[in-house]
Each structure stands twice: as C-alpha cells, then as structure tokens.
Image: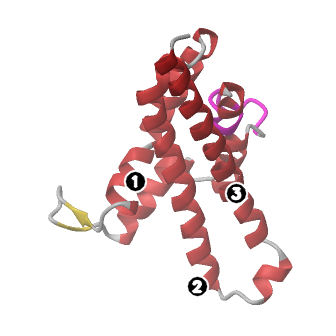
C-alpha cells in the first residue's frame, strides 16, 4: 500500500468511526425521548422538535455516507464493495440527499420558487423512513432481522 492509499484508508477509518457514533447517538436519542423522565418535562411541541432534530441528524449522517462512498470507494475491500454500493444506491433512492439539499441545507425550493411546505417536508421524511420511524431505526441499526439487506450501521461497522 503506497503512502497516499494508506492516508486515504486512515481518513476512511476516521470518517466511518464518526458515522457509527452519529448513527448510534441519533437512533438512541429516540429511546431517550420516549422515557418517562424526558416526557415529564416535555410538551408535545418540544417532543416534536426533538424528533425533528434527531431525524435531521440521522438523515444528514446518511447523506454523508453517500458522499463517503463516492470519495472513498477505492479503499473499500473488494469483498465489501458491492454491498456498500447497494447501500449508497438505497440511500439515494430513499431521498436522503434530497432531504439534505432541500430541508436541512436550505429554506428555498428553486423548483417551486418558494419555501417547501410542511407537507412536502413530511413527504420527504416518509420517503426516507418508508412511513414507519420505528422500522427505519431498526433498519439503520441492523436490528430488523431481514427487512432490507443494506443496514447502514452494520455495514459501516464491517468497513473498519
């Protein structure tokens, strides 16, 4: 392995470690939001805001995974390249880049020449989660036992 390949591999390792932490933190946030301790001091509006924050954090991390694949696929071991590519394509199909570009990163829809309406944002969220947040979180963490083959957290853990 030449020096630049080694440096790229080290960068990839650091990035994947960061993604693991972000996906674990983001998904476990929902468990905390569901505790009696948290709910005791939270109005429905506060709970909705925290859920929105955690969703955005997870979706942004998944968008970063797409970018990671695009820039670091050459350091992914050959036996893992296909599943990583499939995960990347799954994330694109689910719309995580669209959510990052249209909701997290901007307020203005250039397509509509206006801000996105709440129902449009909700539709993007449903596209990503398949309309079931609980199943989506299980999918991310690899706890779905066969519902979808490309689990972001378990695949990311295998890469490093």
Magenta part mainly helix, strand or loop?
loop
- Marks 3 and 2, how far apart at CA: 22 Å
- Asked if residue 86 can be seen in this view, the reply is no
Spatial CA span between label 3 and label 1: 19 Å
**Residue that badge 3 annotates:** 25
Nearer-the-camera pick, 15 or 108: 15
User: Mark 1 to mark 2: distance in Å?
Assistant: 23 Å
Give residue 14's position: percent from left, percent from top: 61, 38
Mark 3 or 1: in front is 3
Q: Is residue 111 above or below residue 159?
A: below
Provide the residue span drawn in magenta.
144-154
Q: Position of residue 79 (x, y in %)?
A: 63, 10
The tag earlier along the polypeptide, 3 or 2, is 3
How packed mark 2 is, by other alpha carbons closer than 10 Å (few <14, some 14-19, many 20 or more), is few
> How many neighbours does mark 1 have within 10 angstroms: few (below 14), some (14-19), or many (20 or more)?
some
- Is residue 64 at all visible to an observer of this figure? yes
Q: Nearer the viewer, mark 1 or mark 2?
A: 1
């Amino acid at each position: 392995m030449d020096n630049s390949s080694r440096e790229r591999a080290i960068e990839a390792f650091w990035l994947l470690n960061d993604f693991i932490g972000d996906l674990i933190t983001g998904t476990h946030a929902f468990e905390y939001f569901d505790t009696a301790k948290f709910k005791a001091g939270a109005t429905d509006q506060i709970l909705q805001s925290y859920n929105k924050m955690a969703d955005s954090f997870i979706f942004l991390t998944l968008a970063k995974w797409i970018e990671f694949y695009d820039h670091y696929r050459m350091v992914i071991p050959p036996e893992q390249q296909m599943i990583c590519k499939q995960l990347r394509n799954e994330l694109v199909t689910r719309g995580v880049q669209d959510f990052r570009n249209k909701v997290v990163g901007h307020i203005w829809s250039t397509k509509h020449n206006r801000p996105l309406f709440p129902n449009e944002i909700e539709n993007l969220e449903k596209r990503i989660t398949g309309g079931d947040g609980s199943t989506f979180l299980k999918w991310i963490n690899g706890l779905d036992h066969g519902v979808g083959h490309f689990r972001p957290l378990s695949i990311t853990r295998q890469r490093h």
